[in-house]
Image: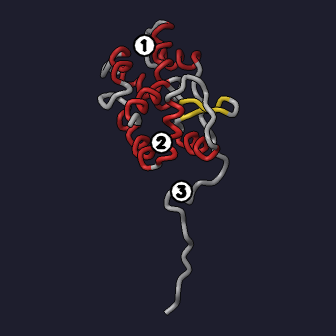
Amino acid sequence: MTEEGYVSLNVNQSPFNVGLPIEIGEFNVTQIKELVQRHKLNWSDTEVGQLKEMIDGHPYLLRTALYQIATGNLTLKQLLKVAPTDEGLFRGFLHPYLSLLEEDKLLKAAMKKVIESDIPVQLDYTQSFKLRSLGLIKFKENKVQCLCNLYRLYFRERLSE
């Protein structure tokens, strides 16, 4: 009987992660307007601004919102009203983040500090790195702020305990 050698793998990381990671940045107003047009929505600058104010230029959130609005499943007004709630379109997207924050008290405290401030805040490097890796914050020089208003509103309500 021979012993086989097993390589210990990190189950939280794909063994196929090779190469240079590419990060998709946030869309700017011009790009958002183009996406709105591509979805055949005839919006004013005010409506584009309202959407950007809620979800900033987050690619997934933008695409999901615009698709649902373009297909008639909801209006911009409805989206803005329920987006940061558990009735909203993004509940399935936000719940896993909430679970992660609830499981890690230090990460939860760091996120609370971010969402309770209207200006960028200084965080411990480890917590900043983790929150940024999750896509919940963005850096402003050496400080951080919430990636978008949707996150601020959603997590402010749920992490207030």
- Seen in the picture, residue 10 relative to 54 is either above or below; the reply is below
- Taking 87 as reference, is 45 above or below it? above
Give the answer, above or below, for where 133 lies relative to 67.
below
Disc 3 marks which residue?
Answer: 13
Is there CB contact under 8 Å for labels 1 and 3? no
Looking at the rendering, in which quadrant would you find the C terminus?
Answer: top left
Residue 143, picture quadrant: top right
Question: Is 42 situated left or right of 132 in this image?
Answer: left
The quarter of the displayed image where residue 154 is located = top left
**Residue for badge 2:** 108
Q: Who comes first in sequence, dot 2 or dot 3?
A: 3
Whole-angstrom CA distance, mark 1 to mark 3, is 39 Å
- Identify which residue, 146 or 11, lies in the foreground: 146
From this viewpoint, is residue 28 visible? yes
| Identity of the residue drawn at 44% across and 46% down | 100
Q: Which amino acid does label 1 sit on?
A: Leu
Q: What element carries label 1?
A: loop
Residue furthest to the right in view is 141
Specify the amino acid type for callout 3: Gln
Residue 118 spot, x, y in % from top left:
55, 22
Disc 3: CA contacts within 10 A as few (<14), some (14-19) or many (>=20): few
Residue 70 shows in this picture: no
Spatial CA distance of label 2 from label 1 is 38 Å
